[in-house]
Image: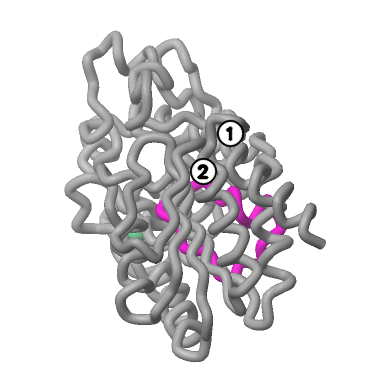
Amino acid sequence: MADMDNTAIQRAADLIEDADALVVAAGAGMGIDSGLPDFRGPGGFWAAHPALGRRGLEFYEVASPRTFETDPALAWGFYGHRLGLYRHTAPHAGFGIVKGWGARMFQGCRVFTSNVDGQFQRAGFSDDVITECHGSIHHLQCSRPCCGDLWSSEDFAPAVDDETCTLLNAPPKCPWCGAIARPNIMMFNDMGWVDRRSKVQEASLRRWLGEAMRIVVIELGAGTAIPSVRHFSHELVVNHGARLVRINPREQSVPTQRDVPIAGPALAALQTIATVLAGRR
Ligand SMILES: [Zn+2]
């Protein structure tokens, strides 16, 4: 890891050693080292979904509640593919590294992520320490929605033709009104997203933050295009006196000189910091 700034790595290790509470703030870049696509990274959306590229369909057009009305087989072809991908993807070793750091801290660890993939749960993080600010693909809701109910997507096994991005089997239905169900994810131009679950998660996170001292935020792969995670990190710096370690291959600049920018991918940076910490013990 010779290309990573050693001073920054040492400073990040210092902050982790000195902290009593860890917040892991993760964007799409966190999944790349597990082999998951980042639609806004190099290659982009159509590299991950060539069938949509051939039809000239953009991310915001497909990931829209309207598509569940106009072309449900396409909408569920897209989300069904992603559901299958996330179910079968093993989280990379970086998840275990931050989990280990959190376990050693006096006040433990919380996760704030814009990722809808459920990878933190798969990596063994408890559901009640996670805030999924854009929802989760592993939960479904009514597309209307007729009510605020959410239910697990585990009973739905999508059969998707990846050549055309089309769902081949029946889409899930709302058990209350029979309308097509959709993932409980905040989409583009989304007036119908049921945010109840995310609100409950965030309220729990806020209670924990109210008591947490000496917080270090490790922000991983959160870009400026979808700024929710970066806004959250900055808010912790301003309102909770948190120290920030920002790990990002392209957009690593930090708000203050107290914060630590690390230019690099998530897994390599975490492994480098872990090696430094191990050498100090
Ligand atoms: Zn319904």
Tell me the residue at 47%/29% (across/down): 37
Viewer can see residue 278: yes
> Looking at this view, is 194 or 272 the one in front?
272
Element on which disc 2 rests:
helix
Which amino acid lies under the numbered mark 2 shown in the image of this protein? Met
Tell me the residue at 36%/57% (across/down): 229
Viewer can see residue 115: no
Query: What label sits on residue 55 in the rendered view?
Result: none
Disc 2/disc 1 C-alpha distance (Å): 7 Å
Q: Quadrant of the N terminus?
A: top right
**Contact, CB < 8 Å: mark 2 with mark 1?**
yes
Residue 127 image-quadrant placement: bottom right
x, y (%) of residue 107?
63, 82
Tell me the residue at 65%/76% (across/down): 108
Residue 263 image-quadrant placement: top left
Query: What label sits on residue 33 in the rendered view?
Result: 1
Whether the magenta-drawn stretch holds residue 118 is answered as yes
Which amino acid lies under the numbered mark 1 shown in the image of this protein? Asp
Whether the magenta-drawn stretch holds residue 171 is answered as no
- The residue where tag 2 is placed is 30
Element on which disc 1 rests:
loop
Looking at the rendering, the stretch of residues picked out in magenta corresponds to 110-127
